[in-house]
Amino acid sequence: MKLKKNIGSILLFLLPTLAGLFLFKLYPIFSALVQSLYTTQFFTGEKSFVGLQNYQSLFVDPVFWNSLKVTLVFNLIINPLQIVLAFALAMLLNTKIKRIAFFRGIHFVPVAVSVPTACVLWNIMLSPEQGVVNSILVALGLDPQPFLGSSTQALGSIIAIASWKGVGYWALFLLAGLQEIPGSLLEASSLDGASRWKQFIHVILPLMKRPLTFIVVAVTTANFLLFSPMYILTKGGPENSTNVLMLESFNNAFLYSDMGRSYAIMVILLLITLTVVALQFKWLRTSH
């Protein structure tokens, strides 16, 4: 009864959030779905309804299929890599040693650097001619590497840069979750003779279900939509080896002025992301 009496007040407080959700999340999705069914004339800007033609043209385009492959490979590698590294970093930052506050501050430095600045810095450091990374390799007696200039190394280099930038941020959430675990549980398991590995598997991991669920979904969503490192560092090259779907959509919209095709790519990317996230929710619910 009390809840029914306060339902008006609850809706009033939720109204700004619901309005923002509709304006900034639901309406753009609905608009993209509608606009993907239209094409725009290059000279006149006139829109005309073409139905599913934009999707049909994508499915016979090898550039789109290559972008889809690059996007999936990129996410298959970077998502588990960032989650594992973030968890390991959070475990290290949760240890009770002297000056741990200093190390917690240091690990956040890459997060504080903006994405364009980080890309420019890594572009200089990975330069084949004068980059510090190749200078170190040569000093160690190894051959210099092309990194971003190679079709076989560019995607891996971007994965390394994106992980350097993002792992510290995701580790913060996991660190907060680790600090919520009661110390008495770990002490009790130690008294029972449990090793550190058994403590991790049977005590820490089950209690980290909520933070891990958030991190898995957030990392997946962020990396499926990531395109600024590819745009700044490689423009999708060499040989389209870093041309992810987000970058392909951007190119169609702002280089080729084909907004309908760009919207169609975004709708496909949204469906892929929602499918992966739904599978992750199902997997995380049944595994604990």
Image: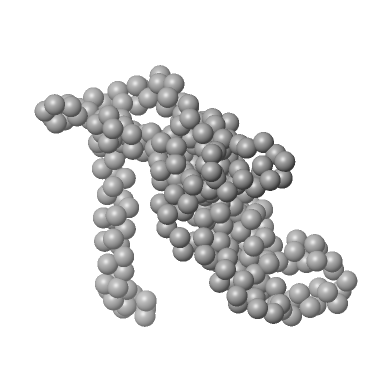
Residue 164 locus on image (x, y percent): 56, 54
Outermost residue on the right side: it is 193
Residue 190 locus on image (x, y percent): 83, 74
Residue 192 locus on image (x, y percent): 87, 74
The quarter holding residue 54 reads: top left
Residue at point 58%, 31% (across, down):
152
Choose between 61 and 143: the one closer to the eye.
143
Residue at point 81%, 73% (across, down):
189
The reply to whether residue 210 is in sight is no
Residue at point 28%, 32% (across, down):
255
Outermost residue on the top side: it is 60
The quarter holding residue 155 reads: top right
Where does the C terminus fall, quadrant-wise? bottom right
Choose between 132 and 249: the one closer to the eye.
132
284 is higher (above) or lower (below) than 134: below
The reply to whether residue 135 is in sight is yes
Choose between 216 and 93: the one closer to the eye.
93
Query: In the drawing, does residue 123 fall left or right of residue 77?
Result: left
Residue 71 locus on image (x, y percent): 49, 36
Where does the N terminus fall, quadrant-wise? bottom left
Query: In the drawing, does residue 188 fall left or right of residue 6?
Result: right
238 is higher (above) or lower (below) than 204: above
78 is higher (above) or lower (below) than 243: below
